[in-house]
Amino acid sequence: MLSITAFYAALLAVLFLVLSVRVIGWRREQRVELGHGEDAELLRRMRVHANFAEYVPFTLLLMALAESMAPPDLLVHLAGLLLIAGRLLHAYGVSQTPGILRYRVYGMWLTFTALGLAALICLSLSALFLAV
């Protein structure tokens, strides 16, 4: 059972919905159907949403694969917490006008750390299983 990854996936889904509604709401308000219509705020919101969509699914996939190999639960929780913190910091930093670069950078570092940790767990445990 992948209950740890499911928990973090559900929390991240809520954040994804919030980011989606922010884009849709601004599109309606500015009457922009496609693209960003040269609207800097819409482009900013779209990039926050897109960046989330670029990193979160792959990290969650690696977390699920790692969890399926039964590492210590703490490692999977750590990856999930890092991912959530990273995505929140990044979204906040990029969403501000002007953007807050340090939050954006910290957010990406935490996201990359979560991705790397999940990959490392998968590599370590799969190497152990292959060696047997």
Image: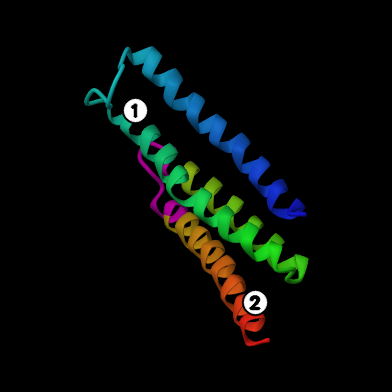
Find residue 126 and report its horizontal and vertical position in percent. Answer: 61, 76
> Compared with residue 11, is residue 23 higher up or lower down, i.e. above or below?
above
Numbered tag placed on residue 125 in the rendering: 2
**Residue type at tag 1:** Leu
Which residue is label 1 attached to? 42
Of residues 16 and 107, the one nearer the viewer is 16
Measure the alpha-carbon separation of dots 2 and 1. 43 Å
Between discs 2 and 1, the one toward the N terminus: 1
In the rendered structure, does residue 96 fall within the stretch colored magenta? yes
Of residues 96 and 123, the one nearer the viewer is 123
SS of the residue under disc 1: helix
**Residue type at tag 2:** Leu
Q: Are marks 2 and 1 in contact (CB under 8 Å)?
A: no
Left or right, 3 with reference to 94: right
At horizontal 44% and vertical 21% (from top left) the residue drawn is: 24
In the rendered structure, does residue 18 fall within the stretch colored magenta? no
Left or right, 69 with reference to 22: right
Q: Residues within 10 Å of mark 2 (few under 14, many from 20)?
A: some
